[in-house]
Image (tube, helix red, strand yellow):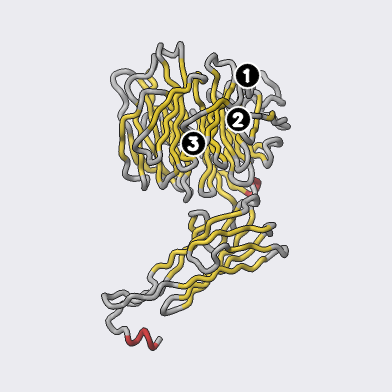
């Protein structure tokens, strides 16, 4: 402290250290996926020394270590003396403590984080009993949902508004796109988080009739300030940030829905876009990416089959599967190793987008007229790094939320309410799963961490 006493003109504030695992700020206890094998971890030091015009504190020094609390396996820090490192989990134990020692010019700080494994069964689900108060009623709800790396949830309602929440209780309307008038219409669309911010596309679905006017694309780096731009007229069904690119897919029409064809748009910055038609499709339903491979899934040009195309750059596409299933596609997602297509009556997986395997579902979503062993009601599926969550229901009937460790055995989530709601879109990010319905309902879950 003698050194500090000589800095008579300095203001001194004790330093603090924040730790982030996969860009999620952690506290004293942190839950992590049992199947995770690597994770980014970084430290941010605040107030590393006196603040005045003449003082220039030396850079802090870092040292990462760990202590296993159960089992005898270990971890590995790829850069144990850097503020940002990579955590390699070797035959992971159930629980361990990460220890960070930070030495500044004036003090030494120690942070400890107890890291615990969780699984889908150890998630807490929150189901509001009524539709969200701002949901368009009586017949409309939400067309899309996304979750950021820090667990912020954004939904698109069918009146052209984007809403964001962190807890599912307090919601903020961050942006609204004007509806066309006087023609009655909905503002449907898709939203995603990636590339450092939010991106969404909304289009006018006129009642009745074909699309009218261009779509609108919106971008925000902070969820508060949004910019708008005109986007091609089309029914945009999915947008994602994958493989360092934004990719949007959907379909267009030339004769009021009598003939439709797939459409794809790509961008590296969310501002400048390249567009191309995909005539093999009547509609491109979704886009996913694993390990350098992009896959689009959708309906064939005659609407008889679910088909795919594959690409290494999201620009040049080659045929994938010519017939994954003959059912209508209602969900497309991916985990760390495989692509997953959900169609009426079937669930299929593939590691390359070309060869697909049907998954033998052993649980059943009750569906009027289809019996207890029918799985037709599954819609969108999300993967949280550990297990899967799926919504069910169609046109507001018999919607439930289910989870599964393996895509085969499914269990209805405790508290999943009865009633007329269909969970149409499900998303994961920052440890949070969120799902929305076409009747204005919302649900979310987070892992149990003491």
Q: Quadrant of the N terminus?
A: bottom left
Q: Is residue 358 above or below residue 447?
A: above
Quarter of image, res 381: top right
Q: Reading the chain from its start, which is encountered first: label 2 or label 1?
A: 1
Q: Judge by depth and name the residue closer to the eye, 32 or 373.
A: 32
Give the mark toward the camera: 2 or 3.
3
Q: Residue 230, position in %: x, y?
A: 31, 30
Closest to the observer: 324 or 144?
Answer: 324
Q: Is residue 421 visible?
A: no
Relative placement, left or right, of 138 versus 183 is: right
Mark 2, residues whose alpha carbon is within 10 Å: few (<14), some, or many (≥20)?
Answer: many
Classify residue 62 as left or right of residue 10. right
Q: Is residue 3 above or below residue 52?
A: below
Work out whether residue 432 can be spotted. Answer: yes
| Residue 271 in the image: above or below residue 31 | above
Q: Give the distance between the C-alpha atoms of the residues marked 1 and 3, in whole angstroms.
A: 28 Å
Name the residue carrying label 1. Answer: 326
The answer to whether marks 2 and 1 mark residues whose Cβ atoms lie closer than 8 Å is no
- Which residue is located at x 38 percent, y 41 percent? 269
- Mark 2 sits on what residue? 341
- Percent across and percent down for residue 136 are 40, 29
Please, which residue is most extreme toward the bottom here?
Answer: 2
Q: Tag 3: Cα neighbours inside 10 Å, few (<14), some, or many (≥20)?
A: some
Q: How far separated are the C-alphas under marks 2 and 1?
A: 12 Å
Q: Position of residue 280 (x, y in %)?
A: 52, 19
Picture quarter with the C terminus: bottom right
- Write down the residue under mark 3: 313
Q: Secondary structure at mark 1?
A: loop
Q: Quadrant of residue 190?
A: top left
């Amino acid at each position: 402290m003698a050194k500090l006493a000589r800095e008579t003109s300095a203001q001194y504030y004790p330093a603090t250290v924040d730790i982030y695992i996969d860009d999620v700020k952690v506290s004293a206890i942190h839950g992590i996926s049992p199947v995770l094998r690597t994770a980014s971890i970084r430290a941010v030091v605040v107030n590393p020394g006196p603040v005045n015009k003449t003082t220039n504190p030396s850079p802090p020094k870092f040292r990462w270590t760990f202590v296993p609390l159960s089992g005898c396996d270990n971890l590995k820090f790829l850069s144990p003396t850097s503020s940002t490192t990579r955590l390699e989990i070797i035959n992971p134990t159930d629980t361990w403590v990460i220890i960070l020692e930070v030495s500044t010019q004036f003090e030494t700080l120690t942070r400890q984080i107890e890291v615990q494994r969780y699984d889908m069964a150890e998630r807490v689900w929150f189901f509001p009993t009524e539709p969200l108060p701002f949901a368009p009623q009586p017949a409309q709800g939400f067309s899309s949902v996304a979750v950021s790396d820090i667990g912020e949830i954004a939904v698109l309602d069918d009146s052209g508004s984007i809403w964001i929440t962190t807890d599912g209780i307090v919601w903020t309307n961050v942006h609204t796109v004007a509806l066309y008038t006087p023609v009655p219409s909905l503002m449907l669309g898709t939203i995603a988080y990636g590339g450092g911010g939010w991106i969404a596309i909304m289009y006018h679905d006129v009642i009745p009739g074909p699309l009218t006017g261009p779509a609108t694309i919106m971008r925000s780096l902070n969820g508060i300030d949004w910019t708008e731009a005109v986007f091609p007229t089309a029914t945009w069904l999915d947008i994602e940030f994958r493989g360092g690119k934004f990719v949007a897919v959907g379909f267009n029409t030339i004769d009021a829905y009598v003939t439709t064809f797939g459409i794809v748009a790509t961008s590296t910055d969310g501002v400048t876009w390249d567009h191309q038609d995909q005539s093999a499709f009547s509609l491109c339903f979704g886009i996913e990416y694993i390990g350098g491979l992009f896959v689009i899934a959708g309906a064939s040009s005659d609407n008889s089959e679910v088909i795919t195309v594959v690409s290494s750059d999201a620009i040049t596409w080659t045929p994938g599967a010519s017939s994954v299933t003959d059912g209508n596609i209602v969900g497309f997602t991916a985990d760390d190793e495989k692509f997953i297509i959900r169609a009426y009556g079937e669930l299929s997986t593939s590691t390359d987008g070309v060869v697909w395997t049907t998954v033998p579902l052993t649980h059943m979503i009750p569906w009027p007229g289809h019996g207890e062993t029918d799985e037709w009601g599954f819609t969108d599926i999300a993967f949280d790094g550990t297990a899967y969550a799926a919504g069910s229901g169609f046109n507001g009937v018999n919607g439930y939320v289910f989870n599964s460790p393996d895509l085969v055995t499914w269990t209805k989530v405790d508290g999943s309410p009865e009633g007329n709601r269909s969970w149409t879109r499900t998303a994961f990010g920052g440890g949070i799963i969120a799902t929305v319905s076409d009747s204005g309902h919302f649900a979310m879950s987070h892992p149990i961490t003491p």
